[in-house]
Every structure is written in C-alpha cells, then in structure tokens.
C-alpha cells in the first residue's frame, strides 16, 4: 500500500516535471535555472498555462503566493472593481531594491519635479509597469503575466538578474477583472476535449454583452482620461504616486491577424501636445527588441500601418502624457483555446507566448535605455513649466453659476489628474504653466485642424465641454486659493421647516436623484413649467423652469415626516432646498398654478441583448445606478414578446439593430406609447423609429443629384479606406441651440450647449414648430474632425433632439448620445428630463 502510494507520488511528480520541461521549452526558453522553492504557474494551478482560462482570483492567488515565498516580490491591493474583485499590483525587483523602495521612489520622483535637477540618471532603477488585460475577452496577456511574474521571481539567469538590478517592475495582471471573469467562464464552459477549432463553435462566440467591458459595460481603455470607473480611478491614484517610465498595454485583435507593436501609424500618432521624441525616437529604441523577440520564434507582425494614440484616454496614450512611454501590443486572438484561421489554427498558448516574449523584450529595452528614458521624463516635466510665449493663453477660467455639483464633478476630474485648480470669486481658474500642462491642454483646448482624418476613436476630448463648463482662455493670470479637495466645495444652507411648501432647484446636477428619492418615499412633487420668483427662507429668489415644489398639505404624510425626508435628501445629495410660507409669487406663476404639474414616478425599462449597443446601454444603466440611484429593468430582447409593457411608463432604446422586433412587436410598442407612455430613443434607435414609421419624422436626405449623369471621379483602390474613413463621424463636439422653455430643456439657462456626436443619425427638424427641442447652430463646430460634406450637407440643417406625439404618448428622439462614456454631465440632464418629465409632455398642435 505504502509502496503504491510512493510510486503514485513519483509518477505525479514526473508527469509535472515532463510538462514543466515542455512549458519551459515553449515559454521560458533560456530563462533557467529556476529556484526550486518557487512553484511555476503550472504547478500552482494544476494545469499548464494555455490549457484553460485562468480565473482572476486564481491569478491573484498565484501572485500572492510568489510574494509570500520570495523576497523579490511584494503585492498590494490598489482597489476593487464594481463587482468587488481585487485590483492588485505585484512589485518585483531585487531584495535590496525592494527594501529600499521608498528611497528609490523619492529619487525617481525627483525627475518628475520641474524645480529639481538631479543628474544621477543611471543611479536609480528604471520604473516599468507591465499592465495586462484591460479588455476582458482578450485573455492571453493576463496568462502571460503569470509567466512573467514567475520568470522574474524564480529565474536565476544572468539576464533576469540584470533586469531586477536595473528595474523596479510593477505588474498589474488584470486591469479589468470583472470583464475577464465573464469571458473566462464562457471560454472554459464550452471547452471541449478534443478542442473544437471551428470558428462557429460556441466557445469562440461569446454572448451579449461579452467580456471586453467592465460591470457597467464600459470600455476601460477609454476611461483613463474620464476616470469614471473604480478600475481607472484607483489606477490613476497609483499612477500619480509612481510615474512609471514605461507602461505596457496588451490587447488582442482579429483572429486572422498577426501581431502588432509600436510604432503606430505615423501621421495618426502625432499629437500636437506631445514631445515628438516620444513617437520619433523612443518607439524605435523599443521596436528593435520586439522585432528580435518575434523573429526568434518565427512569429509574424506588423507596425506603422494602424492604430493611433491621439485619444488621451487609452492605456497606451495616457502614460505618454505623464513623461512615460506607453506601448500598445495587439495579438491575433485565439478567442477560445484553438481556432481556425486562414493559415491553419491559432492556439491559446501561441498567443500567450507572444505576449510573454514582448513583456520580457519591454524590460530588456527599458533597462538598456534607462538613462534616455529618465532624461526624457525629466525634460518632459521641465518643459511643462517653461515660460510661455507672449500673448498666449495663461489660464482657463470656468464654472457654472447655477450648478455647483456639476462644477464639483469637473474639478474632481482635474484633481485626479493632478491639475492645479484655484478659486477666483465664483469661478475657477486653471493655470496652463504647471507640471500637468499637457493635461490642462487636453481638458480645455479644442482643435479644428488635423493631420489625419481617420481616427481609431474620438477626435475630440476637451473634457470641459463634456461638463458644459463654459470655459474661456485668459491672457492674464490671477489666482485665488488653491483647491486641493472637492469635499467642502458645495455648501448649501440647511433647509428650514415649513408647513406650506419646499422648493428644490432643478438646475443642480443632483436634483433628479433627489426627486427619485422623494418619489420613492411616497412624497408628491410638482415641476414648475414656468419660472417664478418667490419669498423664501433666504429672501426673494427666482426659480428656473423645472424647479420642484413639495406642497405640504397635499401629502399623505405629516409635515414633520415630510421635513425629515426633505432634510435627509438634502444631506444625501447636497442640493439647494428652500422653504416658503406662502404660495404668492413676487413674479411669474404662483405655487397653485396649473403650470406646476404633479409628477409621475418613472417606471422605466431599457432594452438590452443581441443587436443592442452594449456601451450605450451600459451608460444608461450606470447613470441611473450610480448617480440617480433609480432602478431600471434591463429587459432582454428575447423576452420582449412575452413582456407586459404596462408595468412601465418609460422605455429606453439605445443604438441597436432591433431586427428581433417584427411587425407584431412594433405594433405592440406603438400601442403602448399611444396609451400615454414615453419611448426614449438614442442615436441609431431614433433612426429606427423613423425607419419603422412609429413617428412621422424624417431623416436628412442627400440632396438629389443626377447620379446617372454625374461623372464619378476615379480614385486609386489603395486610397479607399482613407477616403471612406473620412466620411465616418468618429466623435466630435458641436454646439446646439436648445429651447430652455421646453420640458426637455429644463434646468438650463443658456440656450447654447455642447453635445457629442459619433454617429451619422441626422434628424430633420420636425414639421411641428414646438417639437424641435434642439438644433445645431449656424456654426456648430466646437472640437474634433468632421468632413465638409457631413458638416454642410447633413449636420448644419439637422436637429439634435425632437419629440413626436404618438396618440396620448410621445417618442423622444436623441440624435446624439447624451450619456456618452458616463462623462457628459452637460447633457445628462436632457436625458433625465426625458425620464422624469417625459410623461408630462404633449406636443402642441402645429400652427398653420
Ligand atoms: Zn483590446
């Protein structure tokens, strides 16, 4: 018995050894000898890397094990995701470097402080951040991360010792754990034995919403600038503590592709605010090592042809704006364990090996170019505070006089990027000359000239416009007190008890959330459809369209109970609330006016599922969950047929193909709206309701040209992608003229408003004079690329927001997405107006 057991153990060990040896040959060639006490990922997990997909908690457990067993590694948790998964960073270097890490950090940071001039470039190890897996269904890189960690911690080769002596490596195995686990579960549950490589097999075709994005279906690789999600917010905090010199960003692309490493598309990557050394010199110093790593194993790759780093919110562009070198890698995806391609099959281990080899090559290049990288970072920050040219803009002033919570949200954004902000009376000021000068430019500058017209993503990102901050450049600098925290930025005076009525200011960003809270507590709230002035506990005050009124005598609760709830909601949302003892106004409507309409509580559903744009759907869900704290039913398309819509008074449809809704379903939708309900459509869904004739509106058509007779100019075949790409609308900012007297325009004071457009939905203004809520202005361009044809022929004559009566109900059509990337605080209000006031809108019959 005993003998058998022994034999069995020996057998297991030898099996492990055999597999390990092969793994070493395949992944870890030339990295031996390894320390015996450190388990390889294969020994720890019980299967060789690449055999299946590793869950995030297993990855964290492995890295934790390494930090426990070795003095060359230590682990920190720098945050957690929406779904409470850990975000971890494994720091790896020599024992000595880790012991002296605080000292090294101080020396390193001295190079990022423009007022210091250290010259010990070679003295300090280079800080490299190896970051993996921002897109959850691009799984190869996080598997490679475990092999990289093992190599660096366990290998005693002279090569690895050299890296550890000269570098501190910060390894983030999974930037997007929620998305990763969504995909991991999918790939493992459909894994077959033997593997099925047929591209049509379920293993290779994830279901909606797929694992690319995070919990709220946000693309975290766009969130570095906007800092909406905890994954990016915590990473940014870490980032501004360490300022790494090199940062990697590993991705996957189409299965039939090969491998991509930088340099990127030369024209596209030229950024007007970036030192050209970044993309002209540094990239090439690294590319020689990537090329060597790939050539050595016979892997094919391409460079220069694709991808641009212009949008500053990528993982491969944000660090470039912090004096580092950010590197994009793209591996053809096996999406699953083995998949057919035009060149035979692509296996998961193959994709992992390429990511592993380029991780190691990154380290090699970073160590070899330590002095250059460090000098570069020093120059980068010093150049930010250089004296400015005469007459240039020295600061930006911003601030909304009516909405402190929106100001606060924008200032939070500035502070997270370490931009210095000062108070100046009721406004705020950001000087240009400061270490974060390039982030200041990113936030406030707008552009209308581009070297390239085909963008991988947005071409406009002046975040001050996202927040409708009405900013302007100053040529003279006066600074007040520096703002270092947003904690005490909003100071509202506490509401006093009354037995008559309370009034809430609808202009504040947080008031819709307060309204939902009050409604959910059974408090009756009315909205003022006309403005008024009235005597309050703070004297005579004027109230804008949409102001909320809580009439005490109309409640079923006692005055005391109502006061308690109002007090609570004010503390919760930090909004202006006033009390009045009389309904008689000093100007405008009295509080008993018919123009104060008792509001219905929204009971809302959002259509989701196959064919629906998950990003736009996620933005609606995120807004309501995290800011309005209002539930919305995520109604799957496949349940639409059997769902009783009568439970809802509001339905939201974002961009999507909606092919699953046949004529019977469309009829069902129409009947439901006609009963008095509200359908809100965004972007392509607005086109859909017009195409399906739910409403009698139209789209802007191309002016009729005599196509038959017209001589079509010839063009070279090779130019087609560039020429056609120019007619896309990747994302730009335009100005609209908003009817602030329309319920959908309530809460705004100015009729001009920046909006974000990244589609080609061009609504014709309605034939009804009262139905076009917003329309592009005469010169609408604010920021970003748009072709002349799109601007002149389509955009200028079109409407951005219209509402159409359908029976007793209405359809609210947004041409543009008011909730883009969770960051359009300036236009969120339009959407929330549709949600909270939509059921009270009827379109007046048109004049004749
Ligand atoms: Zn990706």
Image (cartoon, helix red, strand yellow):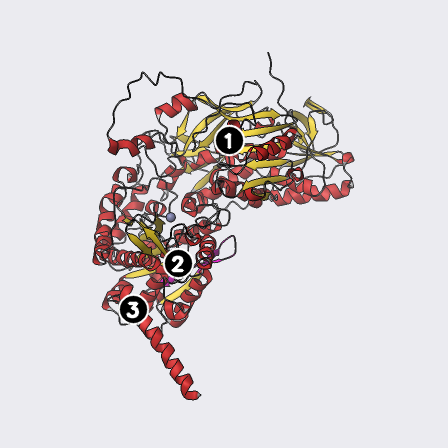
User: Which residue lies at the image location 45% right of the left edge and 35% below the top edge?
Assistant: 464
As drawn, the residue found furthest toward the top would be: 848
Label 1 environment density (alpha carbons within 10 Å; few <14, some 14–19, many ≥20): many
Q: Is residue 389 visible?
A: no
Residue designated by label 2:
173
Which numbered disc, 3 or 2, marks the residue closer to the eye?
Answer: 3
**Left or right: where 241 falls relative to 551:** left
Ligand 1 within 8 angstroms of badge 3 C-beta: no
Which of the two labelled residues, at mark 3 and mark 1, occupies the earlier sequence position? 3
Q: Which residues are magenta?
A: 77-92
User: Which residue lies at the image location 37% right of the left edge and 37% below the top edge?
Assistant: 441
As drawn, the residue found furthest toward the bottom would be: 2
Residue 603: image x %, image y %? 64, 39
User: Which residue lies at the image location 25% right of the left edge and 40% below the top edge?
Assistant: 266
Which of the two labelled residues, at mark 3 and mark 2, occupies the earlier sequence position? 3
Quarter holding the C terminus is top right
Dot 1: element: helix
Seen in the picture, residue 185 relative to 757 is either above or below; the reply is below
Residue designated by label 1:
688
Marking on residue 22: 3
Seen in the picture, residue 229 relative to 591 is either above or below; the reply is below
How far apart, in angstroms, are the residues tagged by discs 3 and 1? 55 Å
- Please state which of residues 795 and 160 is positioned toward the viewer in this rendering: 795
Q: Check if residue 88 falls in the magenta segment.
A: yes
**Left or right: where 433 falls relative to 229:** left
Residue 134: image x %, image y %? 40, 51
Do the CB atoms of the residues marked 3 and 1 lie less than 8 Å apart? no
């Amino acid at each position: 018995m005993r003998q058998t057991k022994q034999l069995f153990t020996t057998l297991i060990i030898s099996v492990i050894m055999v597999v390990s040896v092969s793994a070493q040959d395949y992944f870890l060639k030339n990295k031996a000898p390894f320390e015996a006490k450190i388990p390889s990922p294969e020994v720890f997990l019980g299967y060789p890397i690449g055999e299946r997909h590793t869950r995030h908690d297993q990855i964290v457990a492995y890295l934790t094990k390494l930090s426990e067993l070795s003095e060359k590694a230590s682990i920190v948790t720098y945050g957690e995701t929406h779904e409470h998964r850990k975000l971890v960073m494994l720091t790896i270097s020599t024992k000595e470097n880790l012991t002296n890490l605080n000292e090294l950090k101080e020396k390193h940071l001295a190079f990022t402080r423009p007022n210091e001039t250290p010259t010990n470039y070679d003295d300090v190890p280079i800080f490299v951040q190896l970051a993996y897996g921002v897109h959850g269904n691009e799984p190869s890189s996080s598997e490679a991360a475990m092999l990289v960690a093992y190599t660096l911690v366990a290998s005693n080769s002279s090569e690895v010792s050299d890296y550890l002596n000269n570098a501190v490596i910060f390894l983030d195995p999974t930037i997007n754990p929620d998305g990763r686990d969504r995909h991991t579960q999918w790939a493992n549950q459909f894994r077959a034995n033997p593997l099925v490589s047929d591209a049509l097999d379920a293993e290779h075709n994830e279901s909606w919403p797929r694992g690319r994005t995070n919990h709220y279906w946000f693309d975290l690789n766009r969130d570095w600038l906007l800092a909406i999600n905890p994954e990016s917010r915590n990473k940014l905090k870490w980032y501004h503590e360490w300022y790494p010199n090199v940062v990697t960003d590993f991705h996957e692309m189409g299965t039939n592709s090969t491998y991509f490493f930088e340099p990127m598309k030369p024209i596209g990557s030229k950024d007007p605010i970036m030192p050209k050394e970044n993309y002209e010199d540094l990239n090439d110093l690294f590319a020689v090592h990537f090329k060597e790593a790939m050539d050595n194993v016979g892997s094919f790759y391409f460079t220069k042809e694709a991808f641009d780093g212009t949008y500053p919110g990528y993982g491969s562009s944000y660090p470039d704006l912090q004096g580092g070198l950010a590197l994009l890698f793209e591996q053809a995806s096996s999406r699953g364990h083995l998949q057919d391609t035009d060149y035979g099959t692509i296996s998961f281990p193959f994709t992992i090996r390429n990511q592993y080899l380029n991780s190691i090559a990154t380290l090699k290049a970073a160590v070899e170019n330590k002095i250059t990288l460090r000098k570069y970072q020093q120059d980068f920050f010093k150049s930010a505070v250089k004296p400015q040219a005469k007459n240039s803009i020295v600061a930006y002033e911003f601030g909304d006089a009516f909405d402190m919570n929106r100001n606060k949200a924008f200032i939070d954004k500035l502070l997270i990027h370490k931009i210095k902000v000062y108070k100046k009376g009721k406004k705020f000021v950001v000087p240009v000359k400061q270490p974060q000068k390039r982030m200041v430019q990113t936030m406030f500058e707008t552009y209308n000239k581009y070297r390239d017209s085909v963008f991988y993503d947005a071409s406009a990102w002046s975040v001050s416009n996202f927040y409708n901050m009405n900013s302007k450049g100053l040529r003279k600098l006066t600074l007040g007190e520096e703002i270092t925290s947003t904690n005490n930025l909003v100071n509202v005076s506490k509401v006093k008890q009354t037995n008559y009525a309370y009034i809430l200011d609808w202009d504040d960003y947080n008031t819709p959330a307060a309204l939902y809270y009050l409604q959910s507590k059974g408090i009756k709230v009315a909205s003022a459809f006309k403005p008024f002035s009235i005597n309050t506990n703070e004297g005579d005050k004027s109230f804008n369209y949409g102001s909320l009124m809580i009439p005490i005598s109309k409640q079923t609760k006692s005055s005391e109970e109502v006061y308690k709830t109002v007090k609570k909601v004010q503390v919760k949302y930090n909004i202006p609330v006033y009390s009045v003892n009389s309904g008689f106004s000093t100007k405008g409507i009295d509080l008993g006016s018919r123009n104060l309409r008792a509001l219905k509580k929204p009971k809302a559903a959002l259509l989701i599922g196959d064919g629906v744009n998950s990003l736009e759907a996620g933005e609606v869900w995120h807004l309501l969950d995290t800011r309005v704290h209002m539930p919305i039913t995520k109604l799957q398309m496949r349940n639409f047929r059997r769902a009783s819509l009568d439970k809802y008074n509001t339905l939201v449809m974002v961009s999507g193909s909606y092919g699953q809704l046949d004529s019977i379903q469309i009829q069902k939708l129409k009947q439901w709206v006609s009963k008095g309900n509200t359908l809100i459509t965004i972007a392509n869904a607005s086109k859909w309701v017009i195409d399906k004739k739910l409403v009698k509106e139209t789209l802007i058509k191309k002016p009729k040209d005599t196509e038959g007779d017209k001589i079509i100019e010839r063009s070279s075949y090779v130019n087609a992608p560039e020429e056609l790409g120019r007619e896309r609308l990747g994302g730009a900012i335009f100005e609209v003229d908003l009817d602030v007297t329309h319920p959908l325009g309530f809460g705004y004071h100015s009729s001009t408003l920046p909006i974000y457009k990244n589609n080609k939905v061009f609504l014709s203004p309605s034939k009804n004079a009262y139905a076009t809520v917003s329309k592009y202005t005469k010169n609408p361009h604010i920021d970003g690329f748009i072709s002349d044809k799109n601007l002149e022929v389509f955009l200028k004559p079109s409407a951005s927001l219209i509402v159409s009566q359908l029976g007793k109900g209405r359809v609210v059509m947004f041409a543009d997405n008011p909730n883009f990337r969770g960051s359009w605080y300036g236009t969120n209000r339009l959407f929330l107006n549709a949600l909270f006031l939509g059921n009270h809108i009827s379109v007046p019959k048109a004049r004749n």
